[in-house]
Image: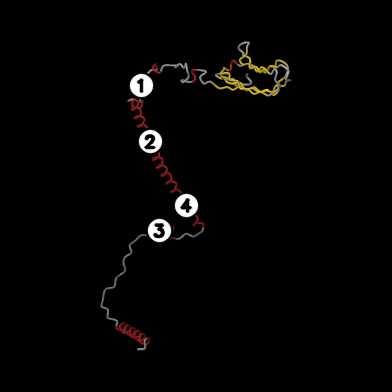
């Protein structure tokens, strides 16, 4: 049966279903045995006999309940013909199911299940929150303080490095400006175009104010008045001419 049924512990066979066609003459005697040997003994786990004596050949189909027989009691199956005749197109089918309680310890709901241990025998473990321990709290505070000091020192190192970098860059820029001025002076000398004010310095001294004219009486400008009056008169004449007055 190893090539017929799955080899699974707790498997049981519930029915044997078979069919075949008997080939014989009416007057011949023939017995057909559908059987399965018991591998644990010399007998048969299942044996069903069909008596075809005095019958003509025909087809047969049967379902035989066998209860729930464990898999280990099923051996090699066969169809045996006794008498005159033969069998063609035989077929034997076994229906089976799995018994989940074959091992009672597989499920607490199975009969005869035995508790593997008594939960009451387990020791009671008292839980202590490690974060509430004074030594741990003190260590955590110490660690936080050290981290704060390290962060302060790190910021100071960055600040000092930044200041030194700015000073270094300032020196580099000043040196670059001096170099640029020297290059410009050399270029001017090479072009022979050096303004005197570029290299010569002016002598210092005192520049006194020029003498001021004293105030005196200025007569009225009568000609200016006449000119102004003549211009006004000319303007009015032009307006009158425009409107034909």
Distance between mark 2 and mark 4 Cα atoms = 43 Å
The earlier-in-sequence mark between 4 and 1 is 1
Quarter of the picture containing the N terminus is top right
Which residue in the protein does label 2 denote? Answer: 151
In this rendering, position of residue 189 left or right of residue 130:
right
Residue located at (35% from left, 29% from top): 140
Whole-number angstrom distance, CA of label 4 to CA of label 3: 22 Å
Judged from the image, the secondary structure of the residue bearing numbered disc 2 is helix
Distance between the alpha carbons at the discs numbered 3 and 2: 58 Å
**Which residue is under mark 3?**
201
Helix, strand or loop at disc 1? loop
Q: Which residue is mark 4?
A: 180
Q: Secondary structure at mark 3?
A: loop
State the residue at coordinates (44%, 48%).
Answer: 173
Task: Check disc 4 and report its element: helix, strand or loop.
Answer: helix
Residue 13's disc is: none
Q: Is residue 204 above or below residue 41?
A: below
Mark 2 neighbour density, 10 Å: few (under 14) some (14–19) many (20 or more): few
Q: Earlier in the sequence, mark 3 or mark 1?
A: 1
């Amino acid at each position: 049966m190893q090539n017929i049924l799955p080899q699974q512990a707790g498997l049981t066979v519930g029915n044997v279903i078979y069919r075949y066609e008997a080939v014989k003459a009416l007057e011949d005697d023939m017995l057909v045995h559908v059987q399965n040997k018991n591998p644990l003994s010399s007998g048969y786990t299942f044996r069903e006999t069909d008596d075809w004596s005095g019958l003509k050949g025909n087809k047969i189909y049967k379902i035989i309940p066998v209860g729930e027989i464990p898999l280990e009691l099923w051996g090699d199956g066969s169809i045996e013909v006794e008498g005159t005749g033969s069998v063609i197109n035989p077929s034997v089918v076994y229906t089976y199911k799995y018994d989940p309680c074959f091992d009672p310890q597989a499920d607490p709901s199975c009969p005869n299940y035995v508790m593997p241990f008594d939960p009451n025998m387990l020791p009671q473990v008292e839980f202590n929150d490690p974060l509430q321990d004074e030594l741990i709290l003190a260590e955590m505070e110490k660690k936080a303080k050290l981290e704060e000091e390290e962060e302060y020192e790190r910021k100071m190192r960055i600040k000092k490095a930044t200041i030194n970098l700015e000073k270094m860059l300032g020196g580099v820029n000043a040196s670059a400006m001096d170099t640029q001025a020297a290059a410009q002076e050399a270029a001017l000398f090479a072009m022979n175009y050096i303004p005197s004010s570029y290299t010569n310095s002016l002598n210092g001294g005192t520049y006194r104010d020029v003498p001021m004219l004293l105030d005196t009486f200025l007569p009225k400008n009568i000609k200016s008045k006449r000119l102004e009056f003549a211009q006004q008169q000319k303007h009015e004449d032009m307006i009158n001419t425009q409107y034909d007055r």
